[in-house]
Amino acid sequence: MKKAILLLIIAAGLSSANAQMYNYLGNHVILNMEGYFSPAWMNPNPVSSGWDAGRGTKRYFGLNYFLSPSVELIAWKKGTVGAGYNYFNSPFIGTDERVKVLNGDWGYYDYGELNGNVTAHGFNVYYKQYLGDGFAPLGHHLKFTFDGFFYHYRMDSTVAVVPNGVSYDELPSVMENKGSLFGLKVEYGYDFVMLNRLKLSLGASIGTTFGGYRVPCNRIRDELPMFDIGPRSDKPIYFDDHARGRILGAYWFGIKLGIGFIAF
């Protein structure tokens, strides 16, 4: 009888241990706040644009960032799923053949650069697979994410511009407009838990958006002639292309820092 009771206690203990691993101490909902950061060597960015520093300092020490709060669920002992919100904001510089820009005493000229700003709100959904001896939500992992961005760009309205090939009624939609852009990225990272509730996360990601390549490709061709191969597109480049390229430039690589709370 005593042996049977002992065996039942051991079996119950093992079952409880497995349940705790599967749900992490009985909990399986995690609230996260994550940020993805990348260097902005080729572009203006929201971090360094306000610095009282030289152009080189702004260029090489500024950062792009995405903010992504999310809710994560432990789906099984080796994986989690989650969904969250995306936020991105950045200045950019763009040209558009549909406007002419006033250049001081020289009058209006084509392809003048204007300062602009793009803000994007969106969503993300992801699956995280824990590797090796790790189990959700601890250890090394691969994270596969689908992102959506609904952006709004606005060009500097303090600089005098006139329409070029469009009417004055169409000019406001050239200077300010909206769009959407989607992307996929994969991340390698590491999660660890403190005090059974606080989750810290580090990682690095690479990915791509489904669009936004026209401006970066033209820039590469202009700065690196060895890549100037094949015919160029006859399609003109607009402010919208610069805004989409700005999101891509910040998205393709990122270093993630995250903090989470294992709620229940």
Image (cartoon, rainbow, N blue to C red):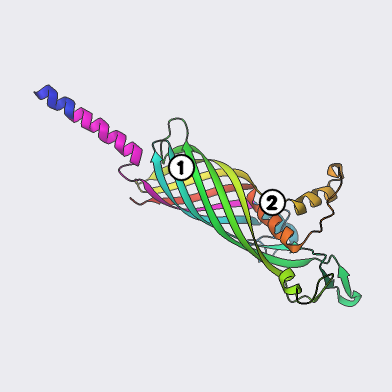
Residue 52, magenta (yes or no)? no
Residue 191: mark: 1
Residue 89 at x, y percent in the picture: 61, 62
- Residue at far right of view: 106
Question: Left or right: where does residue 229 sit relative to residue 251?
Answer: right
Tell me, yes or no, whether the two marked residues, 2 and 1, touch with CB atoms within 8 Å. no
Residue 234 at x, y percent in the picture: 85, 54
Residue 29 at x, y percent in the picture: 37, 49
In depth, the one of 23 and 42 nearer the eye is: 23
Report whether residue 68 is seen. Answer: yes
Q: What residue type is labelled 1?
A: Asp
Residue 107 in which image quadrant: bottom right
Question: Left or right: where does residue 205 sit relative to residue 258?
Answer: right
Q: What stretch is highlighted in magenta?
A: 9-38
- Residue at far left of view: 1
The answer to whether 110 is drawn above or below residue 62 in the figure is below
- The CA span between labels 2 and 1 is 31 Å
Secondary element at tag 1: strand
Residue 18 at x, y percent in the picture: 31, 34
Residue assigned mark 2:
211
The answer to whether 78 is drawn above or below residue 55 in the figure is above
Q: Which amino acid does label 2 sit on?
A: Gly
Q: What residue sits 86% from the left and 45% below the top? A: 228
**Neighbour class for label 2 at 10 Å: few (<14), some, many (≥20)?**
some
